[in-house]
């Protein structure tokens, strides 16, 4: 079911014209489950953090003015009137000429405004010799110096990482209001695909795409719904795709989109609802058979069965849509400049994505983009490729040693 091939840019435009991603909803998420979720609303502190003046060192709480003039040759003598430990509320009021032993994190007693470190004093019984003058607020974290009451500490749309969840915990929150992640149905199609964990039958390959695509979906912030392997059978495929569409917000398939007699995917997804298939075939290499449909206002991305081609087309077309549904700003593919390690040719009339491995040329102090030779079905492309170089439709080739922009799959 191939229509006229559309260009890569036209394919992206068609997707944008047919689908406007909207939030799925929102929910309260337990703090320990909120990692990588997107905050629904601004978070405003209802109290100061810290909620009291606290010591940042082990030492002695003092009135700064009582230490003025102290130095190594003429120490000031103070009387030790008590001890304050972390987690307790001081009951004493610091008097003139007094000091209170204090530990890191403990609240300052009333009237104290500085803390002298242990290294700058000498204790003899209940007398303290102070050998350095303290300025007000020395070694003190003031109330509200970290977070002021009424301050917006996190903003709607922020992705919650370790530090953001730490902020939530500092405010005593047990849950966070987050956008619901979209559910993404994932299935592999083909009689040649075998479920992993079983003996591999002759002539078959293990299911790679369901696992690599599911992981890529998780990286987007969405939740994969695993449908496994479906054979090239019209009834089985139609039933599974109908169920997948009903139970998820997006459907991602791989395989069964070429022109073989058993490639039913395009015609089945076209029958699931209007408008059906909006593009079937893109002028790219690899990834030409990629098909995109919409039914029940849900996207259906039918990707090639070849693992490298499937993952590449997912990154280029499906990932931005999923990130929008996750209420995230679609992240641009990270890129780096390098020099072509060999001549890179385009497929005539098609945008060509050349998988490359980056190699450091120590002698000349530069990165070399070495093309990885192999078919798009080669498993090693997934593990060896650091990224890809685009050869545009109107380019014949990229010369060796020509500077290129490498779009990265992963950090280097």
Image (cartoon, grey):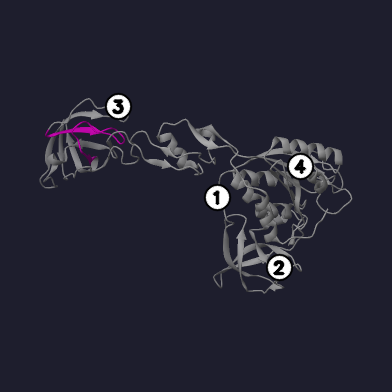
Q: Left or right: where does residue 198 sit relative to residue 388?
A: right
What residue lies at 60% left-to-right and 43% top-to-bottom? Answer: 22
| CA gap, disc 3 and disc 2 | 71 Å
Residue on which the image places disc 3: 88
What residue lies at 12% left-to-right and 44% top-to-bottom? Answer: 68
Magenta segment boundaries in residue numbering: 96-117
Residue on which the image places disc 1: 329
Dot 3, how many residues are within 10 Å of its Cα: few (below 14), some (14-19), or many (20+)? few
Q: Secondary structure at mark 1?
A: loop
Query: Quick one: label 1 or label 4, which is nearer the N terminus?
Result: 4
Asked if disc 2 and disc 1 are in contact, CB closer than 8 Å, the reply is no
Residue on which the image places disc 2: 393
Q: Nearer the viewer, residue 104 or 145?
A: 145
Count of marks, rendered view: 4
**Image quarter hosting the C terminus:** bottom right
Q: Nearer the viewer, mark 1 or mark 4?
A: 4
Query: Quick one: label 3 or label 2, which is nearer the N terminus?
Result: 3
Q: Nearer the viewer, residue 240 or 208?
A: 240
Asked if disc 4 and disc 2 are in contact, CB closer than 8 Å, the reply is no
| CA gap, disc 1 and disc 4 | 29 Å
């Amino acid at each position: 079911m191939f229509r006229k091939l559309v260009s890569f840019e036209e394919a992206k435009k068609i997707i944008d014209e047919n689908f406007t991603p909207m939030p799925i909803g929102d929910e309260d998420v337990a703090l320990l489950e909120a990692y990588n979720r997107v905050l629904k609303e601004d978070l405003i502190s209802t109290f100061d953090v810290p909620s009291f003046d606290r010591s940042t060192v082990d030492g002695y709480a003092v009135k700064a003015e009582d230490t003025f003039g102290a130095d190594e040759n003429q120490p000031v003598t103070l009387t030790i009137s008590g001890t304050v430990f972390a987690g307790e509320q001081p009951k004493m009021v610091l008097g003139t000429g007094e000091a209170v032993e204090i530990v890191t994190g403990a609240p300052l007693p009333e009237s104290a405004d500085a803390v002298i470190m242990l290294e700058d004093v000498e204790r003899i019984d209940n007398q303290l010799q102070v050998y350095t003058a303290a300025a007000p607020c020395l070694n003190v974290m003031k109330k509200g110096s970290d977070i002021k009451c009424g301050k917006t500490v996190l903003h709607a749309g922020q992705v919650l990482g370790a530090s953001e969840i730490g902020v939530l915990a500092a405010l005593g929150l047990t849950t966070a209001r987050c956008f619901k992640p979209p559910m993404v149905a994932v299935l592999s199609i083909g009689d040649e695909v075998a479920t992993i964990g079983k003996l591999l039958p002759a002539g078959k390959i293990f299911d790679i795409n369901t696992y690599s695509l599911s992981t890529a979906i998780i990286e987007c912030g969405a939740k994969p719904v695993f449908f496994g392997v479906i054979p090239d059978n019209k009834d089985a495929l139609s039933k599974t795709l109908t169920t997948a569409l009903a139970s998820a917000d997006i459907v991602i398939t791989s395989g069964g989109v070429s022109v073989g007699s058993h490639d039913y995917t395009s015609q089945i997804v076209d029958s699931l609802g209007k408008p059906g298939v909006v593009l079937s075939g893109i002028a790219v290499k690899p990834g030409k058979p990629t098909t995109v449909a919409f039914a029940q206002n849900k996207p259906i991305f039918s990707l090639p069965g070849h693992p490298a081609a499937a993952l590449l087309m997912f990154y280029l077309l499906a990932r931005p849509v999923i990130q929008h549904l996750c209420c995230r700003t679609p992240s641009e593919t990270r890129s780096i400049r390098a020099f072509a390690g060999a001549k890179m040719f385009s497929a005539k009339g098609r945008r060509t994505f050349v998988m490359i491995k980056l190699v450091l040329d120590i002698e000349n102090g530069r990165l070399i983009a070495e093309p990885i030779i192999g078919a798009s079905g080669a498993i090693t492309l997934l593990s060896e490729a650091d990224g890809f170089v685009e050869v545009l439709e109107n380019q014949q080739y990229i010369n060796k040693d020509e500077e290129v922009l490498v779009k990265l799959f992963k950090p280097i």
